[in-house]
Image (spheres, rainbow, N blue to C red):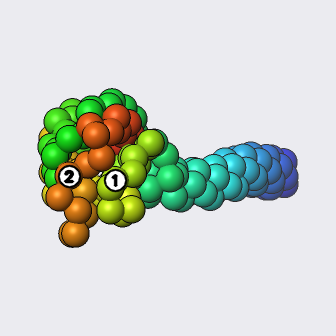
Amino acid sequence: MEVLRLATKTLQLAIQTAIDGVRSVVDGIKTTTDSTKVAVDATKANVDTLLAGRVVKSVQRGSFSASTTTHTVQIGVIAPNKVHIELYGVTNSGGFAPRVTNVTTTSFVVDAGNSVSTFNNAVPVSWEVVEFY
């Protein structure tokens, strides 16, 4: 009977040691999983920040010869609330720089300004539309 009790005690210790070993491995996996989740969450936050208006999605450029008070420029499809439009090389006879108005998903209007009737001698105008994510 004593041998059986000793064998049982030894077997119990072996089983407990195996359980403790498995528990240690599982705890290690949980620690790795938790730190991976933290890294993934941080990466997602960085991507969200980048996509929130700082990353360029598309750039469109062109030019036209302006000779009237307004000129409509046709462009590829964009999100009007996510673009920046620049005009280059423009002045007009009244000394006011033309401005961009009426931005839609496929066009924008260049306006000579409130008090100016025409652009000065068909001024060449270059433009650039930068769309952000």
Q: Nearer the viewer, residue 112 or 74?
A: 112
Q: Which mark is residue 27?
A: none
- 86 to 34, vertically: above or below: above
Mark 2 residue crowding within 10 angstroms, few (<14) / some (14–19) / many (20+): some
Residue 31, horizontal then vertical, whole percent: 69, 55
Asked if labels 2 and 1 touch by Cβ distance under 8 angstroms, the answer is yes
Q: Amino acid at mark 1?
A: Asn
Q: Nearer the viewer, residue 116 or 52?
A: 116
- 6 to 123, vertically: above or below: below
Please say whether residue 77 is visible from this viewpoint. no
Residue marked by disc 1: 92
Residue at 25% over, 56% down: 112
* Disc 1 secondary structure class: loop
Q: Nearer the viewer, residue 42 or 111?
A: 111
Residue 89, horizontal then vertical, whole percent: 44, 42
Q: Amino acid at mark 2?
A: Thr
Please say whether residue 96 is visible from this viewpoint. yes
Mark 1 residue crowding within 10 angstroms, few (<14) / some (14–19) / many (20+): many
Q: Is residue 93 left or right of residue 70?
A: right
* Disc 2 secondary structure class: loop
Count the marks: how many?
A: 2
Q: Is residue 69 left or right of residue 124?
A: left
Q: Which mark is residue 118?
A: 2
Residue at 39% over, 51% down: 91
